[in-house]
Image (tube, rainbow, N blue to C red):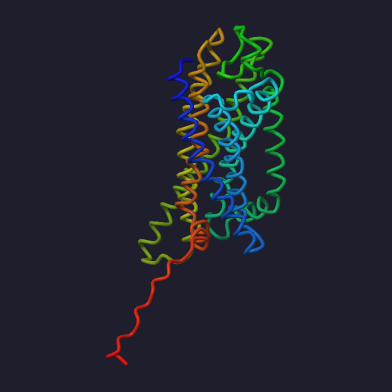
Amino acid sequence: MGASEMFVRAALYLSLAVVGVPGNTVVILSLLLLLNQKNQLLPADTIMLHLACVNLLVVAVRCLAETLASFHVAANVFQDLGCKAIIFIYRTSRALSIWLTFVLSAYQCLSIAPPGSRWVSTRALVADYLGVVFFILWLMNTCMSSAAILFSLSSKTNNTQTSHGINVEFCHVQFPSRFSKQVNGAVQVGRDVVPMALMAVASLIILVILYKHSQQVRRLRSNSGGGAEQRAAKAVVTLVTLYVVLYGVDNGIWVYTLTVKKTMSSSLLSDLRVFFSSLYAALSPLVIIASNRKVNRTLRCLMPEKHVPRKAPSPAAE
């Protein structure tokens, strides 16, 4: 890769890190401060906190490492062990980001369900076992990302191109056979498509419920009840839309990569995949900050108030 291309590559990753790291950090600190004040978080806020943590891992581990290596600041990071660790953490946190977005959309869908419906008990059940849900997601996605530990190698020690590898510039993922590459690719696509389809369905249900509620409000000319849940639901729909667009492009490029018979000499397609998937991790905290009133209120409390000096009374007034 030429010097100009490497500079553009580093600039793109740096832009993601500059936006994503502070943004996710602000969301995490705001929710932790809220937890300290209230001694507990609502289930939706707990899911959002977990989502911000894994998004921070995505942009901090992969984007910062790629930026430093592109500028030849920490190129030694991408040795065999570094490649295994970075790709494994990135793939696991990326997958968790996808599944947690689905969990958030599904829980929000249950939250705006009409009172008295059978979904109210389901929402309470999910809230009670939220820790179990997190554990299952971590276990499942960690196991499904194990190929990164087994097959990732540094491009410095592995310059040979095979017909069943993936070039990610500083690292190569060399599968033992074309069949293993296709199986691993199919598993990753399935891991992304399943929550994508489920969260799309949940978002459609949210939109239908919001539409019916707006019709009722127009007839009753009243806007009492459910305001906070509706605002949160609209924010979740925005997150899901952002996810479907960016990860849809990501998975489209990934499927094309699997159809290539020989390892590509350029890492352009892999870089595009990482960029689009990391873009969600970088932009989602901005959506949360803009739409979540609790986060906004916590941030305003942290900002110092500006005191306007009072004018001294004139002698005539005395």
Tell me the residue at 58%/41% (across/down): 56
On-image quarter of the C terminus: bottom left
Quarter location, residue 78: top right
Left or right: 174 in relation to 268: right
- Position of 131 relative to 152 (above/below): below
Counting the numbered discs, the total is 0
- Position of 49 relative to 303 (above/below): above
Foreground pick, 191 / 177 = 177
Foreground pick, 92 / 71 = 71
- Position of 41 relative to 237 (above/below): below
Residue closest to the far left:
316
Tell me the residue at 55%/27% (across/down): 66
Q: Position of residue 29 (x, y in %)?
A: 59, 53
Q: Position of residue 195 (x, y in %)?
A: 57, 35
Left or right: 120 in relation to 315: right
Q: Position of residue 236 (x, y in %)?
A: 50, 47
Quarter location, residue 93: top right
Tell me the residue at 54%/42% (across/down): 21
Q: Position of residue 97 (x, y in %)?
A: 58, 38
Residue closest to the far front:
315
